[in-house]
Amino acid sequence: MRSLPLERPEVEQSALDAWSLHVGRSVTDAVALREELSTGSLPGAFASTARRRSGALALSVGEGSVTHGELDVMAGRAAASLARLGVVAGSAVMLVAAVGAEEIAAYLGVLRLGGTVILASPALTRSEMHTMASEGEVDVIVGSGPGLATALASGSPGIREAACLRDADRETGATMLDGVSDDVRPVEPVASDAVAILAFTSGSTGRPKPTPLSHRNLLASARGVMSAWRWSEQDHLVHSLPISHQHGLSGVHATLLAGSRASLLGSFDPETTLRTVESGASIHFGVPSIHQRLLDTLGEQARVLGRLRLAVSGSGPLPPELAARYLERTGQSLLERYGTTESGLDVSNPYEGDRAPGRVGLALPGVEMAVVDAAGAPVGEGETGEILVRGPHVFSGYLGVSSAEQPFMGGWFRTGDLGAIDSETGYLRIVGRTKDVIITGGMNVYPREVEDVLRRHPAVTDAVVVGVASPRWGEEVVALVAPSRVDRSDLARFAAEHLASYKRPKRVLLVEKIPRNSVGKTQHERLLQLIPPAGAAMPLDGIGSPPPR
């Protein structure tokens, strides 16, 4: 029997080679590299950078900007206010996190006290906020705007205090967090393994799970990416992503670690993104739909995006056709990467070297990766298996879940994602989710493969494929395709050219827009609500045939 990944305590040469390619130098000592990436705490590292880069611009939000030194003082004042509300090391604070300098200062203030932050999107419902606050044992809620009112109305037991960030929100009854005095709370000593963030998985296929991320986890992930992507204090990041999600927040972490600058737009606007690039932004974070809309909206002006040093795509599959179109229009090659809530950023195309459309690349510095079968044995090149990762970036396990149900295999984190290693490049290709595999008539169908084909049709802007219970076949392949004006018969002919009959969708629902969240991930529950059960009367046309028996 082949050696199991869990039986290999040492770091294999293939991982060291990947790390060396990413950082542009030979890496031979895995222990030293991982220690370098993960040592310290977030507030300690941020404060150190603020002392070194005190007068340099840190964040631009809307019309306002703050320097690293000013943000450090704001964080100290927020920490002093939070301490007066009873926040201490280990306290859980829910931050209803719109994009703003005040929200980021409040986040930093909680970390400075050794507390744990639960980041909640203002778009969440009362029920969702209640669940997060209850499962996270939240002591204090901080926020602004309608999101704060929603959080306070959730009726969560155990909430001792509520604080607002702006005068307009005092009508909620919350205490004003900042501006009470000139007290500036210093950074408290915080252990690397202390929990900095209690994140919640996206819950696309089930109930979101509370996911503790330590200072060590977050530092290792951010520093690994910064070294691979050559992030320096001269860089200027622009993105329109929420900071309540790891994708957007990771850009803030990198900015505060490097002493660089970030323009946080809060919501996507192509013209504002363009102006920010014209003013000198060097890095852009986006999801595939953002890159698509930039090309569609900007026309010939999209060539300005070629001024970027780095354009990153994540939080969803990057269609090869979009990657090719972006390169043709801008002269810039999108860099696709892969990660999870539980393990941060794990894999990336190289900054220097070939970037392969449809492939997410090689393990980032400090990360080990394996692709295994159900028994935990490595699969061959080109073969599909579950992706495992390990390293200092990986969380320790979900809260409230028994050890037997934790997603680990001998110290390796089971991502639940299916992948294959390309035999030519050695890069990882994402195939789908283990839970998303559709077994129809005994045949395995990977939704990602079908989606990639449907998106290649010139009239299709987006597509998502799911398995729906079928009394005859066990499951049948069902596709939602946007926009609703796609010609069904033409799509059927296209699918027949590129997919085996059992892989073709048996039913297709044409919609104006695929339900996705703020970072482009499919909202699985909403999607399933759109699909009537098998046999029901519905405006769906099959474009496939039953699988072989």
Image (cartoon, rainbow, N blue to C red):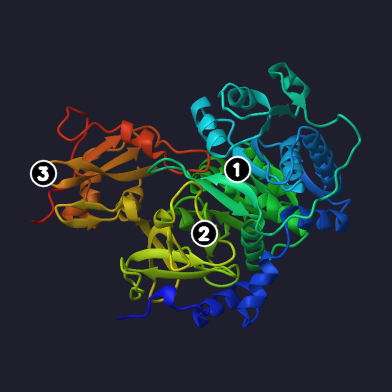
What residue type is disc 3 on?
Answer: Arg
Q: Secondary structure at mark 2?
A: strand
Write the residue at 76% across / 42% down: 109
Q: Nearer the viewer, residue 325 or 395?
A: 395
Write the residue at 69% across / 56% down: 254
**Disc 2 + disc 1, Cβ < 8 Å:** no
Q: Quarter of the image holding residue 483? A: top left
Q: CA distance from mark 3 to mark 2?
A: 39 Å
Write the residue at 48% across / 67% down: 411
Q: Quadrant of the C terminus?
A: bottom left
Q: Quadrant of the N terminus?
A: bottom left
Q: CA distance from mark 1 to mark 3?
A: 43 Å
Indicate which label's residue lies in the foreground, 3 or 2. 3
Q: Secondary structure at mark 1?
A: loop
Residue found at the far left of this picture: 549
* Residue 336, label in figure: 2
Q: Nearer the viewer, residue 121 or 411?
A: 411
Instruction: From the image, tell me which residue sits under label 1.
Output: 241
Instruction: From the image, tell me which residue sits under label 3.
Output: 472
Please state if 278 lies on the left or on the right of 185 as rendered: left
Mark 3 surroundings: few (<14), some (14-19) or many (≥20) residues within 10 A = few
Please state if 50 lies on the left or on the right of 461 as rendered: right
Identify the mark nearer the N-term, 2 or 1.
1
What residue type is disc 1 on?
Answer: Leu
Mark 1 surroundings: few (<14), some (14-19) or many (≥20) residues within 10 A = many
